[in-house]
Image (spheres, rainbow, N blue to C red):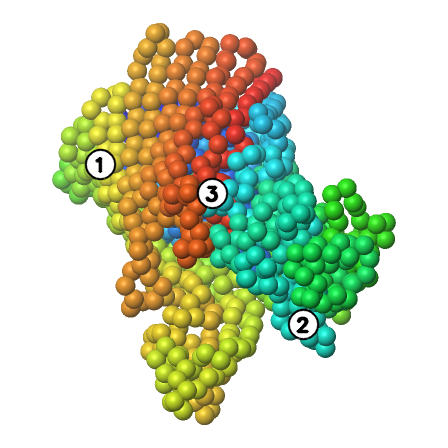
Amino acid sequence: MKLNKIALLLGLTTSMSGMAYAQDVGQDENSQQNNEEDKVERIEVTGSSIKRTAMEGDLPLTIISREDIDAQGITTAEQLLLQLNVASNSNDNLASNTGIVSGEERGNNGASSANLRQQGAGSTLVLLNGRRTATHGLKGRSVDLNSIPFSAIERVEVLRDGASAVYGTDAIGGVINFILKKDYQGAEVGAFADHTEAGGGNIYRFNVLAGTGDLYSDGYNVMASLSYRQAEILRGVDRDFTNTFQPESGLSPDTRGTPFASVNDRPGGDDPTSPNYNLIGTGLINPNTGLENDVLNVLALPGMPGCDVYPLMGDDAAELWNRERNSGVSCAWDYPRAAALQQPVESVDFVARATKTLGDSAEGFVEVIGSEVTSKKVFEPNQITPWAIGSAGWYPSTGESYDYVYDALADYYGADQLNYGAPIAFRWRCMDCGPRQIETTTEAMKIQFGVEGTIGFWDYKVGLGHATNESESQLGGGYHYTEMLAAGIGSGDINPFLLPGQSQSAAGMAALEAASAAGVVLYGGKTTMTQFDASITGDTGFNLGWGGDNIYVAGGIDIRKEGYEFNGDRRAAADRPDIYGAPFDNANVLDDVDRTVKAVFVEALVPVVESFEMNLALRRDDYDGFGGTTNPKVGLLWQPTEEILVRGAYSTGFRTPSFNQIYNGATEEPYTGQDLADPRDCPGGVVDPDDPNCQPIQPTRLFGGKLDLGPEESTQESFGVVYAPTDNFSMNVDWWRIVIEGTIQTPDFRDLLENYDLYQDNFIRDANGDLVTIDSRYINAGERRTSGIELGIQTNGEMYDGIWALNFNGSYLIEDKKKLVDDAPFGPNLVGTHSRGNIPLRWKHTVTFNYAKGDWAHSLTQLYRHSYDDETPAGVASGVANPPYYDGEVGSYLIYNYSVRYMALEDWDVTFGIKNLFDRDPPFTAHQNDYSPGAAFDPRVADPRGRAYTLQLTYKF
């Protein structure tokens, strides 16, 4: 077919190297043909159930070979996704969620997820050998990439388009199919090291692969793979660019919780009868500025040692945070530098597969896959305040430290402003408590049985699989029982006011040790999936009679049962003393919920004429207790000349709500403000004292899961052109657009009030018609539109008796707009803006140049990420601060990776590489890490490890 030339040049496009995989496929086809030279092999690729001779179809497909992966020094699926241009720059991986642990984000503990085309982790389908596997036990809605047995991967296929018509739910943003080795003979041992030049964050891997039996001569093959990987911690203090004391550029730590505690005021603090009675009362009038200081640090006062006497501590750039009244009297602490830039992770994975021929035209197999991943979040020590730990935790009015604080305050503010003898309200970073740690262990397992074969002109496959993923998070160091912590401080044993060189007393350290909550289980979750699938594909023997080939069809069924359970605090309900700052999630405990999904699908490849074919697909999915959805796809492929191919597709898709979104526990919280009126009678819920119908009301607000939540529904469109004028050059341009309706979201409170007619069902009333509850649970509302263009160029040739290849792959995002209410206008285009979740970069590209000569193969890769809008500091937005070097833009990121492979040794394969060849630091950003990952840089865009050297050794015997 004419399509084959374009297929080999473009259909096998990779994002990192353009030369390896076409050869791999050819070798695989030759083995499967079993030396029948007259047989044309048809193979199945991701995105279609129909086997075909050409790899190129109506949807864009990226295929990444094992050789490409090794050349880049990539050791995990997470690292692979970070380098894919079609992947989103979001906080869905371990590098980007080191400090987010509560609420909806608790599922990020220990998990890394795929997120294609800005659609979210729940809208990207991850397959293992073409079939589903269990989602992460805590995450519940997406597959954990850390559980993929990466050392056993043969190749990765990335479908850059929606595929709900083929695979069902979750395939809106695209599909990633990790294909493992299936037939191996011999044995090999591999070792890999990835060492950073600046220290910290090193990565090691060791793997063993062995197999025996030739499937075609012996009738069987048995193989197994075992791999161990360790990623060491990389701390913020290990990289200078993470310094957040850069106020001239718009960045400063937003905390007064310092190792030498700050002194705080409290409401009613001047009244001796008030429980808030404290040393500085309701604040002190600064004798130099006349402003009231409410949070101050005595080290910052004139004549005192200064804020910088402690490591990572400095002057508070108060203006940047709209607290200019405390300028010059407050200290801050660089807490982001105390966090981990790379979480320490250990993983072990195992794959075993046995395959046996069944007669002349079938084979059966059993495959077992297992993994254990242990990750440890390490972030800054707790900030402690007495109003958070209880009244017993005020620092007492006796002792040397009390007098030191009092004397410093009296010297500057005057003793008449102080309440001598009153306890101290404070903000303290408890360095002696140690860094907070949450360790998460995830165990994943899958067993898969299958039979594949041929009957006449028809290929069939049948499979039965069961997968589980169980994850548990427990507290490490840095967490303490609240009551015991308060008692230790209130007694004076634990001292928040220690100068450099001083240390906690023996009694203080004993109190901290006794209060430690290390080992307490935060929560655990488990997902299960049992799946039966069967499909058949083949030649109908019919054609349309207009010069096209025969029509090929496929059809099948997919039946699976998904289960989920979530466990909270394991301690007995009657014995659960509070743990300060521990992010429990007991409100959302689920005993064991499940749902059965039944699906049937059909697909047809219809060659209309020799140069034009259609691909038609239709799938029906029915969910027990949820409902059904039918999704079609129409794909077109036209080749007007041998050099040009035109392709396009239209399809619909859907994403079902996660178990959390449906079954999370319902909680009611009172609305305590006096500014809310009934929006039925008062537009926008605005109080009007003169209107008796618009008086203040205080209903409750309802949060949690919603049983009748519907799916998100999408439409996908794509159109592309492939141009391949010679055997040595091709290029492609593909446009795509995704529109999602009924997006699953928690409605904004103001949106509910201002759109009462639309959301009447969310306002629950009693028998008298009075408003008693406002339902703020998940809803299906609004719309989102995303579109972009992807560009690829591949070319190769000969040079100096060697072979070279150049591969360019770029992604341009045109639009990312959304509206949260159905009848509202779309918001602004978010492309190129900062976000706390995903950063929709305008442009990303990867260029790889490969050169092979004799026993040497070289690879040089350029990775580029375009600049984007920076976060605006609060003080800049209000006009209070004007930092001279803040320009509101995060610069572009450009790095080069190089590797060389030596192949002259008979049994050895050696690859040496350098990542970030020119040791470029990530671009500066003024955002903090309270709500976005990183600080002074962004790990969603840039790698903080710096230049690193990799060495991979493989010995075959």
Q: Is residue 818 left or right of residue 773?
A: left
Position of 247 relative to 422 (above/below): above
Instruction: From the viewer's side, name the closer residue of 530 and 822.
Output: 822
What residue do we see at 48% from left, 17% from top? 900
Q: Which mark is residue 248?
A: 3
Tell me which amino acid carries mark 3. Glu
Instruction: Tell me the crowding category of disc 2: few under 14, some 14 to 19, or many 20 or more residues within 10 angstroms, Cα based.
Output: many
Position of 10 relative to 133 (above/below): above
Q: Residue furthest right?
A: 506
Image location of residue 518, percent across then percent down: 74, 52
Tell me which amino acid carries mark 2. Asp
User: Dot 2 corresponds to which residue?
Assistant: 270
Q: Could you tell me how far apart the alpha carbons at marks 1 and 2 are, in whole angstroms?
A: 75 Å
Pick whichever of labels 1 and 3 is earlier in the sequence: 3
Image quadrant where one finds the N terminus: top left
> In the figure, residue 570 lies in which quadrant?
bottom right
User: Dot 1 corresponds to which residue?
Assistant: 721
Instruction: From the viewer's side, name the closer residue of 157 and 557.
Output: 157
What residue do we see at 49% from left, 26% from top? 919
Image location of residue 691, percent across then percent down: 38, 89
Tell me which amino acid carries mark 1. Val
Position of 776 relative to 915 (above/below): below
Pick whichever of labels 1 and 2 is earlier in the sequence: 2
Mark 1 or mark 2, whichever is nearer to me: 2
Disc 2 on helix, strand or loop? loop
Instruction: From the viewer's side, name the closer residue of 607 and 133.
Output: 133
Image location of residue 214, percent across then percent down: 53, 24
Instruction: From the viewer's side, name the closer residue of 526 and 210.
Output: 526
